[in-house]
Image: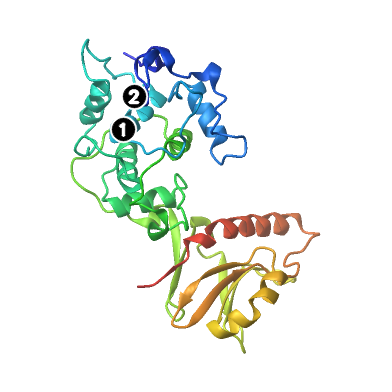
């Protein structure tokens, strides 16, 4: 039997302490604590309209409130309305049917109670995709497939896996998942290892001790050239353009030099990013300052601009080799 979203939205408050009669539904989705400027405004409005989650009687949503495992399962299963979901029996705990469905799919559930961390939510999400990875592999898979983004960087370290999952993050993630996953799946019984080459090309630079996770289309589509007199690595599209073809560059300079000149450098580049510091050297990502493609060649222009847009997304996958 499919879930009836309207019925469940009326039966199950996302906050146990909220009265059933007082729940805020899609028709009342103007939340006092979710302004249009809120980063998850659109996701929250959509989730409420679809009956995935409800608000509170005082017309608030509490976007930063932590989510429990049962609340996460409830949102996920409401979003998909699986055909094999079984309605709860009379007198059952509010989350019994959601937990039962997850168990039937072999998802690796945690002991009941307590808030769900971002890393734990990643593991359950990967289970629902039909895979069984450890927490770090689960996070890496979600990052590599653009199903999730980190809090500071698009890396396992920057993901914030120990931090609690919030209501705003939960509804946003579930909507991303629905765009790529047509139905919830069962998880394999045995734990698997994630092979990143399935989804990304990991560029590895041993002399400068860093990696970047690039789209698979970048493999064999660029070359790296080091400047003769400076520690600047230029990532150039191939085949080369008569205009150059540099998509981006990564430079290193002593920390003291960087601190003395960073204001001038930052002012010169519109999309400069400081990647990190290693052994007294500051690593910086920057786009070229000149036109690096032939404006009269549409094919070359389109190919170059596609790579440039991708580079400005994957710079945050930068990691030092441990």
Give the labeled residue for mark 2. Answer: 17
Q: Looking at this view, is 314 or 92 the one in front? A: 92
Q: Which mark is residue 211?
A: none
Of the two numbered discs 1 and 2 in the rendering, the one whose residue sits closer to the viewer: 2
The residue closer to the viewer here, 131 or 300, is 131
Q: Which residue is mark 1?
A: 185
Mark 2, secondary structure of its residue:
loop
Residue 38 seen: yes
- In this rendered view, identify the residue nearer to me: 91 or 185: 91
| Occupied quadrant, residue 304 | bottom right
Tell which of 316 and 36 is nearer to you.
Answer: 36
Marks 1 and 2, the one that precedes in the sequence: 2
Q: Residue at x 47, y 47 (%)?
A: 146
- Residue 84, relative to residue 190: is it above or below? above
For the point 18% across and 40% down, the residue is 189
Would residue 204 be seen by someone viewing this image from the given angle?
Answer: no
Residue 66 place in picture, x, y as percent:
37, 39
Which quarter shows the N terminus?
A: top left
């Amino acid at each position: 039997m499919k879930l009836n979203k309207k019925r469940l939205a009326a039966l199950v408050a996302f906050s146990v302490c909220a009265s059933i009669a007082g729940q805020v539904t899609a028709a009342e989705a103007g939340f006092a604590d979710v302004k249009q400027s809120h980063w998850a405004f659109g996701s929250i409005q959509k989730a409420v309209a679809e009956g995935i989650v409800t608000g509170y009687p005082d017309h608030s949503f509490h976007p930063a409130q932590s989510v429990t495992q049962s609340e996460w399962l409830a949102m996920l299963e409401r979003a998909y309305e699986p055909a094999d979901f079984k309605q709860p029996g009379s007198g059952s705990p509010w989350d019994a049917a959601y937990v039962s469905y997850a168990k039937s799919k072999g998802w690796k559930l945690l002991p009941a109670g307590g808030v769900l961390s971002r890393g734990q939510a990643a593991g359950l999400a990967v289970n629902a995709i039909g895979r069984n990875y450890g927490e770090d592999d689960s996070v890496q898979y979600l990052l590599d497939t653009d199903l999730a983004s980190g809090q500071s960087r698009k890396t396992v370290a920057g993901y914030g896996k120990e931090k609690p999952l919030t209501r705003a993050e939960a509804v946003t993630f579930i909507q991303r998942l629905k765009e790529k996953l047509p139905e919830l799946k069962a998880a394999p019984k045995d734990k698997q290892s994630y092979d990143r080459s399935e989804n990304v090309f990991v560029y590895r630079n041993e002399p400068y001790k860093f990696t970047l996770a690039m789209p698979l289309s970048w493999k064999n589509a660029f070359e790296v050239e080091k400047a003769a007199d400076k520690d600047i690595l230029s990532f150039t599209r191939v085949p080369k353009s008569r205009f150059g073809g540099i998509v981006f560059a990564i430079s290193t300079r002593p920390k003291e030099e960087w601190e003395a000149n960073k204001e001038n450098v930052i002012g010169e580049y519109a999309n400069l990013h400081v990647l990190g510091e290693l052994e007294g050297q500051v690593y910086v990502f920057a786009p070229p300052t000149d036109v690096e493609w032939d404006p009269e060649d549409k094919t070359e222009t389109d190919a170059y601009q596609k790579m440039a847009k991708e580079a400005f997304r994957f710079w945050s996958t930068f990691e030092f080799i441990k």
